[in-house]
Image (cartoon, rainbow, N blue to C red):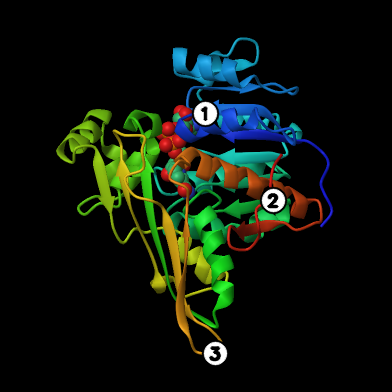
Amino acid sequence: MSETRDVLRVAVLGAGGLGMAATRMLSTKTEMRHVAVADSRGYAYAADGLDADAVGSAQSESGTVGSLSGAGRLSGDAIGDLLAHSEDIDGVFLALPNLPNDFIPTVIERFARHGYQGVMVDALKRTSAAELVVKLDPVLAHVGITYVVGAGATPGLLTAAATVAAQSFAEVESVDINFGVGIANWETYRATIREDIAHMPGYDVEAARRMSDADVAALLDETNGVLELHGMEHADDIILELAGVVDRKRVTVGGIVDTRNATKPVSTTVTVTGVTFEGRRSAHTFTLGDETSMAANVCGPAFGYMKAAHWLHSRGVHGVLSSADVMPRFVR
Ligand code: NAD
């Protein structure tokens, strides 16, 4: 239970809704130093730490963090360029769109091929994408990367809560996740909203990827900005199955996303139903505070899992772990 005392040097890949929230969150942490950020048009790297306000202004004024004065570079392959600094990066948060469905797995493979030896966490959502990451376990274990898959909110915080709640039961019968998300405008979280649309009847990942911004806006006009999602292909199922908690068929995920109102349309809950060793059926429900944003509930756990992964990395544990395998550690 010893503390890791060193300050983790952190890179954030993706400078959209989650990436910029991660940048702001890191500026409040003393145990982590934000040294790098990348988007599709550039990156910024500073060994002694980036200024979150300056990164935010550069991104909002020019559309890329690459325009940051001094530390910024414009690039058509920001991830490739950042790999040149990988020896000076302890942890990577992948806040990238996962469109197509194997995009994040290919980025992970790039880090492994480069010989990166640090920790990586993602906020992946789809079961099929998480399965691709799990398959990389032998490669990452060989190279010396400690990876936590599904380290956001769902999967992530809620999957971990379900794993803790399951301990009261001899058998878990079901895990039901219902999330509510309120964001003021969809453009702040383009990938999140596209990936949510991919779960709607008549859509898939490819169809959502091909939609222009105007197509997305037109669809949201039809629904008054609200997306209702049922029976989602969410990796909470495979993560809970691999951790031995419950069969993936017994895990359901759905939610309501309001893209025109920062207030949550419904509370986010996870309910674990099971039977105790005495034969009593019961359910635990964990409810997130309505005032907590998606960004707080994704980026907080992601950095908590990064700290846990770094702790395990320093003890020689490498390969792919999930948000149900380890507890996130609290980052000060
Ligand atoms: P976004 O669309 O707002 O931003 C994506 C960023 O990635 C942009 O800065 C873009 O320039 C950058 N990018 C795209 N291609 C790149 C490339 N090749 N190299 C470098 N940068 C590149 O995305 P978002 O809405 O913040 O979502 C990010 C991810 O987080 C999505 O995959 C989303 O599904 C996921 N997410 C997970 C949870 C969870 O609870 N697990 C919740 C919300 C979002």
| Circle 2 residue | 329
Residue at the image position 56 percent from the left and 51 percent from the top: 151
Does mark 1 have its CB less than 8 Å from ligand 1? yes
Q: Secondary structure at mark 1?
A: helix
Q: In the picture shown, does residue 24 fall above or below 286?
A: above
Q: Secondary structure at mark 2?
A: loop
x and y percentages locating residue 194 in the rendered image: 33, 41
| Circle 3 residue | 278
x and y percentages locating residue 76 in the rendered image: 50, 23
Instruction: Please name whichever residue, 118 or 332, is drawn nearer the observer in this view of the structure.
Output: 332
**Mark toward the start of the polypeptide (1 vs 2):** 1
Contact between labelled residues 2 and 3, with CB atoms less than 8 Å apart = no
**Mark toward the start of the polypeptide (3 vs 2):** 3
- Residue 252 is left or right of residue 320, and the answer is left
Label 3 sits on what residue type? Glu
- How many numbered badges does the structure rendering display? 3
| Circle 1 residue | 20
Residue at the image position 43 percent from the left and 45 percent from the top: 290
Q: Secondary structure at mark 3?
A: loop
Instruction: Please name whichever residue, 148 or 179, is drawn nearer the observer in this view of the structure.
Output: 179
Q: In the picture shown, does residue 210 fall above or below 40?
A: below
Q: Residue furthest left?
A: 222
Disc 1 versus disc 2: distance between alpha carbons? 22 Å
Disc 3 versus disc 2: distance between alpha carbons? 33 Å
Residue at the image position 24 percent from the left and 35 percent from the top: 216
Q: Nearer the viewer, mark 3 or mark 2?
A: 3
Disc 1 versus disc 3: distance between alpha carbons? 49 Å
Circle 3 residues within 10 Å: few <14, some 14–19, many ≥20: few
- Residue 12 is left or right of residue 220, and the answer is right
x and y percentages locating residue 167 in the rendered image: 59, 74
Q: In the picture shown, does residue 229 fall above or below 295?
A: below
- Residue 182 is left or right of residue 280, and the answer is left
